[in-house]
Image: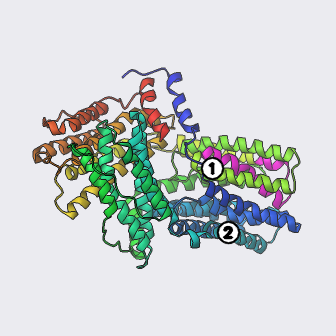
Amino acid sequence: MSTPRPDLAAPHWLVQLLRSTPVPVPWNMVTRAVVALAVPLAIAYAAGDIGVGALISTGALPAVLSESAGPYRYRARRLGGATLAATAGYLAGLLTGGTPALSMPTVILVAAVSAVISAAGSNASVAGLQMLVFCVIATGQHATGVRVEVLFGCFCLGAAWSLLVALVTWTVRATSPERTAVAHVYVELAAMLSATDEAVSRVARHRLTTAMNTAYDQLLTARSWLSGRDAAYRHLLNLLSATTPAVEASVAMVNAGRRPAAEVVDHFVALSAAVLAGQPLPPPPPVPPGDADPVLAALYAGLVRIGKGDDRKRRQPTPWHRRLREWAGSLASGPLTWIAALRLTLCVAIAEIVGLLVPLERSYWITLTVGIVLKPDFGSVFGRAVLRGIGTVIGVGIGAAVLGLGANGWVLVVLSAVFAGGIAVGKVRNYGIQSAFVTPLIILQMGLAHTGNWSVVLARLVDTVLGCVIVLVFGYLLWPGSRRPRVGGRLADGLDAVAKYVSHALVEASSGEARLARSRARRGAYRALADLRTAFQQAVVEPSAHGRQAVAWWPVIAAQERVADAVTEVGVTIGRGVPPPDPADIELLTAALGELASAVREQRAPRSMPLPDAPQLSGVVDQLESAFDAVRGPDLAERPPLGLVRRFLPHQRRT
């Protein structure tokens, strides 16, 4: 592979970094953020003391920053845990603030704890971040002159208010998020089957995988916390399980380059509407007469299966002590967690020392920036540092404009509402957008809570830039292994998941247990591929060898997905007049996938492997040969040609 000129290869990471995710505006989240943050300001201003409203709205920030779509039980645990952790961190910061001998070790200890507990899952990770952020914020509140009990009381009031706003509709909407998730599966099925372009249909298949994963996660999470009164969730989960054959047949049809009749697409749309409205499902369209195509027959049989539903076994809740043991086990066997904790702790300590030695106003923002950017499980450190810096510069410009125009009173309330809504949009679009709205909001809150002037704006800019520099230098450039390529292991894991799927999908499932095992293997393979794409999207924004190699390996990801789709196409025909492949041929396929995984892990070219010559498996073999070519293609020591970037990144952009 030839190495292109650096001026051609460098811009791709910046383009990927600044690109906004094309998702709809989450109006529900926007509304909740506006109400949670702006209403306290409005009430306090009407009562004659907007500064108190600013203190209360600060307490509402943890829930707003931790907000996520999903079932109410999931959101209650996520937001409740984040708010409780933020409150504990805020109290620790208030009690030690003003005394560096106490505040510095407290902040460093909280940083270490927040990194370690991240191994317990995404909710624990969010809670750890909020605990660190608000501990740091609280250490700077001693400068306000307000008593500690008043500050803490206002914070708790705002926290309680934001939780009420986030969960108040639980009693009337109940299973609405879960029904929406299931209905979204049918919407994505209709979109995939109606796509006329291969690239568009592949993006639609990616979105279908995401929709299926989300629906299963939400329903299984909801049911695991119920104690018998789960009829509605059980019905939705059975419906989703019964949809699996239709999903497999739809993927097979798209992979074969065929489109079903319009009535099939219309039926999926009707199913979506019925699930959303809680109405009976519409009857499936009749099977076209005289068509013996096994893929089409499997699709119509899948539509009939949806109407009948499945009867899944009840899922027993996992005891809390078992989850605690699993978390402790992950800490004992997971050195990456300790390495991330050490990096975060070191950079926070450096930030605290810089804030102590350098005479800067509100220097706690240096530590705040380090904590937010360097949180170990939120994507690329380099990307978050750059986006944080860019977003802060933009946000400071907005805050300066607000102060320069002399806005006050109701104008500040309206502006706070706009910034709150922007935070909700930025959470789902781009981290830089979120930073651009968080910055002016905090500037307003700090200015309203106590005397605010241009120094607030300048301090925010200088401290944030210093924090980003600390992260980039000590947490990225000088940290051992931070720029070393780490993409091979994830690729190999994806190949292993596809190999497991091959061993289940290409045999005849004669029992319910066998069909369930095949369904789980299919979901596991496609989930692994979706996680793989996410990991590479995070890595591709880095300008180091890590990012360049992530770009170079995109063809391998695409090849894995096409192998899985080809296997699905063969699998849905088995038992419908088509016999299963010879077991020896299946062993050849799994052995070839195993060789690919070993070659990726060992960073070598894969050896030539014998492949089946059966006509039934010709499509799988063709895609597997393409996967071998893709693994042999990229050179781990070189940048990929620009044509490779242009060819494969457009698919990633649309997802």
- Report the side of 4 relative to 43 (left or right): left
Segment tinted magenta in the rendering: 430-459
Task: Give coordinates of residue 414: x percent, y percent.
Answer: 79, 54
Q: Are marks 2 and 1 in contact (CB under 8 Å)?
A: no
Magenta stretch holds residue 107: no
Question: Foreground: 448 or 615?
Answer: 615
Name the amino acid, label 2: Ala
- Judging by the rendered image, the residue that carries numbered circle 1 is 425
Q: Residues within 10 Å of mark 1 (few under 14, many from 20)?
A: many
Q: Nearer the viewer, residue 66 or 540?
A: 66
The amino acid type found where label 1 is placed reads: Val
Callout 1: SS: helix
Q: Is residue 433 magenta?
A: yes
Residue 159: which disc?
Answer: 2
Residue sitting at x 70%, y 66%: 59
Q: Whole-percent x and y of residue 600?
A: 30, 39
For marks 2 and 1 on the same chain, the one whose residue lies earlier in the sequence: 2
Q: Nearer the viewer, residue 641 or 298?
A: 298
Left or right: 300 in relation to 20: left
Q: Quadrant of the N terminus?
A: top left
Dividing the picture into quadrants, the one containing residue 430 is top right
Q: Nearer the viewer, residue 447 or 27?
A: 27
Residue 142: x and y in percent read: 78, 65
Residue 379 vs 446, above or below: the answer is above
Mark 2, Cα crowd under 10 Å, few <14 / some 14-19 / many 20+, is many
